[in-house]
Image (spheres, rainbow, N blue to C red):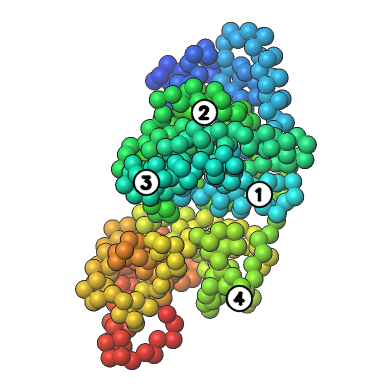
């Protein structure tokens, strides 16, 4: 993410090149006055630059002739106001009635590809135990409907004959998208009833948008918008607020390898195209490759604007049943709401090395410099728990979603041959050197070895990055390339000494492995 001032200048320069001249600049807000037929072109430029530069933004269309764009930053948000010229008063008044109507329907879809972090962001921002909230999964809504369950066995049988294999449910839904849309439309009045009568706020994981896309569940086919998607869109309900979650394809594929890079890019562009065709009153684009706390703050800011008065002070309940491992200073727990994440909490009451603070600073340092994070667990920032502030990280899982073992376990139990171990270590060494990443706490238990495909492994660093303690050396590691390269080499030498000792123990059949 580049500096917000630099980004704003880049955006204004790009708009100027497309003949969008500034109408007025006051109170940190840029104003453009344009004709209605040019609006979508301006919004496309904003979307393209924000998604490319990892910026979150909202488009607010509470007035027909005045559109507000908010671009979020850690320091000061930037605003763009777009004034539409020569709009009839009649159209403005009709639109205001429409806005008031949809504002009553507090049904808010959260869209985005698998692996983008919908559950993580949503449950970390809004308390799922809050009585006024309803959390619904669009897939479950559809698949529990009578019409779906009556037709699914027949469709599955016919598809099995056609495809020559048993289709996955997602593939069935991709092909029979009209069935899914119909089931969703039949259920939608129930959601409206809950918002109007029971005064509920409904968040939906996914929405009809996914089914306007064709081949999203077939890796061998290119994802595209359906030929008659605009016609189908006429029947899909308008919502007041839609949240579009996105991230770089690389980040999404590290979390869930269920799409191809090209399909993630297509999903991003297609969903914005759908929005432009049938705009929600408020549209929020959030890049989940950014820090979790920042993404939370974006949602909380815009939710207050939308009119959701929910506290962000709730605590996640952590207990010993969720404990995975314990070190000298920190304990690692399974996330109570997301089994693909872990929570690291400092339990030491006396003097300690501020490992959470150190790791948070170092992970942000790597992200700001756009380093490759494919061999480290991603950090999603701080959350509040009943045992204090804690950090959320990815949990290392095998391709079948079972927990991965440590690299030391693989060595001790000879799961991998020495040749296989060498390949993985050479790959890790090159990765650390190429990206100038410091692995300082060189214990083999700080490395995990997930099976990413059948009999194919990789090494992931789960702890020990950056430094062992805060101080001048930690500053040098981040500011002196020469010293960093030297330290990477030194720590790798130390690591290899420890590794060779463990290999020897395993070969001799001795098992003084106290931690695996």
Label 2 Cα crowd, 10 Å radius (few <14 / some 14-19 / many 20+): some
The N terminus: image quadrant? top left
Mark 2 / mark 1, whichever is N-terminal = 1
> Left or right: where does residue 396 sit relative to residue 312?
left
**Image quadrant in which you'd find residue 307:** top right
Q: Nearer the viewer, residue 74 or 428?
A: 428
The disc placed on residue 252 is none
Residue placed under numbered mark 1 in the picture = 126
**Image quadrant in which you'd find residue 234:** top right
Taking the image as drawn, is residue 338 in sight? yes
The C terminus: image quadrant? bottom left
Cα gap from disc 2 to disc 3, whole angstroms:
35 Å
Label 1 Cα crowd, 10 Å radius (few <14 / some 14-19 / many 20+): some
The disc placed on residue 160 is 3
Mark 2 / mark 4, whichever is N-terminal = 2
Q: Nearer the viewer, mark 4 or mark 1?
A: 1
């Amino acid at each position: 993410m580049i500096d917000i001032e630099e980004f704003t200048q880049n955006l204004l320069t790009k708009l100027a090149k497309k003949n969008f001249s500034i109408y007025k600049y006051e109170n940190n807000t840029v104003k453009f006055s344009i004709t209605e037929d040019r609006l979508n072109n301006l919004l496309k430029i904003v979307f393209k630059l924000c998604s490319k530069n990892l910026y979150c933004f909202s488009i607010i269309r509470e007035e027909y002739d005045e559109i507000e764009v908010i671009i979020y930053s850690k320091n000061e948000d930037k605003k763009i106001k777009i004034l539409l010229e020569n709009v009839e008063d009649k159209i403005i008044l009709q639109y205001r009635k429409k806005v008031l109507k949809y504002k009553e329907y507090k049904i808010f879809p959260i869209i985005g590809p698998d692996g983008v972090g919908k559950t993580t962001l949503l449950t970390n921002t809004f308390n799922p135990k809050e009585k006024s909230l309803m959390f619904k999964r669009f897939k479950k809504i559809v698949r529990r409907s009578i019409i779906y369950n009556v037709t699914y066995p027949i469709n599955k049988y016919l598809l099995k004959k056609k495809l020559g294999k048993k289709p996955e449910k997602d593939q069935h839904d991709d092909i029979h998208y009209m069935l899914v849309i119909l089931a969703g439309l039949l259920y939608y009045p129930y959601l409206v009833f809950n918002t109007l009568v029971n005064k509920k706020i409904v968040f939906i994981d996914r929405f009809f948008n996914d089914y306007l896309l064709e081949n999203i569940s077939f890796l061998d086919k290119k994802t595209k918008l359906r030929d008659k998607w605009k016609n189908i869109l006429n029947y899909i309900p308008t919502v007041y607020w839609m949240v579009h979650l996105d991230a770089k394809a690389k980040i999404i594929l590290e979390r869930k390898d269920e799409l191809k890079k090209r399909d993630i890019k297509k999903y991003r562009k297609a969903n914005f195209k759908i929005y432009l065709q049938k705009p929600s009153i408020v549209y929020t684009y959030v890049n989940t490759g950014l820090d979790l706390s920042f993404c939370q703050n974006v949602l909380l800011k815009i939710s207050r604007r939308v009119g959701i008065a929910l506290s962000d002070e709730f605590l996640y309940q952590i207990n010993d049943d969720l404990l995975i491992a314990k070190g000298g200073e920190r304990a690692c727990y399974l996330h109570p709401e997301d089994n693909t994440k872990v929570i690291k909490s400092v339990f030491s009451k006396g003097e300690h090395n501020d490992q959470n603070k150190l790791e948070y600073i170092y992970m942000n340092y790597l992200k700001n410099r756009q380093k490759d994070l494919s061999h480290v667990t991603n950090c999603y920032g701080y959350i509040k728990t009943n045992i204090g502030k804690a950090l959320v990280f990815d949990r290392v899982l095998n391709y079948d979603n079972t927990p991965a073992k440590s690299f030391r376990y693989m060595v001790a139990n000879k799961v991998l041959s020495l040749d296989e171990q060498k390949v993985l270590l050479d790959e890790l060494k090159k990765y650390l050197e190429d990206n100038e990443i410091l692995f300082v706490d060189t214990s083999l238990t700080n490395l995990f070895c997930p099976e990413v495909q059948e009999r194919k492994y990789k090494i992931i660093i789960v702890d020990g990055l950056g430094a062992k303690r805060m101080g001048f050396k930690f500053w040098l590691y981040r500011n002196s390339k020469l010293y960093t390269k030297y330290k990477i080499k030194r720590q790798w030498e130390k690591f290899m000494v420890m590794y060779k000792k463990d290999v020897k123990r395993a070969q001799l059949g001795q098992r003084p492995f106290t931690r695996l």
